[in-house]
Image: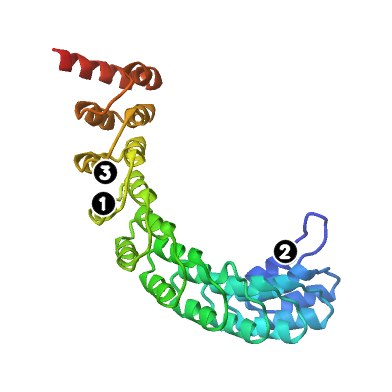
Amino acid sequence: MLMKMDAHGMLTLRMLLRKMAIWSAPKYIHENGCPWDKDTCALAAGNGRLEILKYTHENGCDWDKDTCHDAASKGHVECLKYAHENGCPWDKDTCQVAAEYGHLACLKYAHENGCPWHEENTCPDAAEIGRLEILKYAHENGCSWDATTCKVAAEWGHLECLKYAHEHGCSWEEDTCQFAAETDRLECLKYAHENACPWDENTCTSAALNGRLECLKYAHENGCPWDKETCTRAAEFDQLECLKYAHENDCPWDEETCFHAAANCHFEVLQYAVQNGCPWDRDQVLMECTSEVRARIQNMLSQRNA
């Protein structure tokens, strides 16, 4: 059947709006008694069906801010224009989703026609997807930003966005370096450090627990502090190479390193730590680990005592 029933037994336009390239069918079924609501306009706008949007609005279908939101999120600027010019409401989410999904034309139209900025999310969303032109437009037109913009640019490896934000006065904090290291964005980490972005122990810890050896090396060799958490988290997440590097370069460790290696069944990590002098509570480790790991530990100990 061309027409479908919804859960309440009513004819619905929604499947047709999603699937059909022509607008005569929605017109036909509306003229033959199909009910509609504000979601009809939002679906038309979100699918770029300007003729359907016009028809539904001009024939009394309700709309709300979701119509502008859905048009902006999908980049359908003509639908956005029509809706706004005919009194459809919008709010800050219209600008936010235009930035989030990379639709500069929609963002420009909305801002230039009085739509408020989403101050918290517009610049970070642009930086997260690496859309430098959107980040520039938002900043140059008065949208505020904060350290989150630099953090997400670094986290997602968008160096040009990070550079632009920093060079135009956007603040940054320790988590810019931390998230660059966590996600293996070495160039972003280098840029941030070389331009005086602060860092702390979390940079090394995040690099170690995610196995980002090159970031860990860079951070340590350039003076980033570390503490026993670097070894503990490397052991917990089975990052043997990071643990080796940290230990061989005098990073502290304690019983937690062996405990977390055993608790997560990382025998090779535990073996390395024990054989290299890491303190451990043997009884606690044997109690915490699985029977398979326990047998391997006991075999290791018997070989050492042989």
- Residue at the image position 78 percent from the left and 77 percent from the top: 28
State how far apart marks 3 and 2 are (Cα): 62 Å
State how far apart marks 3 and 1 are (Cα): 12 Å
Give the residue pinned by disc 3: 242
State how far apart marks 1 and 2 are (Cα): 67 Å
- Residue 16 occupies quadrant: bottom right
- Residue 114 occupies quadrant: bottom right
Is the Cβ of the residue at disc 1 closer than 8 Å to that at disc 2? no
Q: Is residue 146 left or right of residue 216?
A: right
Q: Is residue 288 left or right of residue 276?
A: right
Give the residue pinned by disc 2: 1
- Residue at the image position 79 percent from the left and 80 percent from the top: 57
Q: Is residue 147 left or right of residue 220?
A: right
Q: Residue 158: x percent and y percent?
A: 39, 68
Q: Nearer the viewer, residue 96 or 257?
A: 257
- Residue at the image position 75 percent from the left and 65 percent from the top: 3
Assign a secondary structure to mark 2. Answer: loop
Upstream in sequence: badge 1 or badge 2: 2
Q: Which amino acid is tagged 3?
A: Cys
Residue 242 visible in the current orientation: yes
Q: Residue 14: x percent and y percent?
A: 71, 66
Upstream in sequence: badge 3 or badge 2: 2
Assign a secondary structure to mark 3. Answer: helix
Q: Residue 234: x percent and y percent?
A: 32, 40
Q: Residue 22: x percent and y percent?
A: 66, 79
Foreground mark, 1 or 2? 1
Q: Nearer the viewer, residue 234 or 53?
A: 234
Q: Is residue 119 left or right of residue 186?
A: right
Q: Which amino acid is tagged 1?
A: His
Residue 220 is tagged as 1
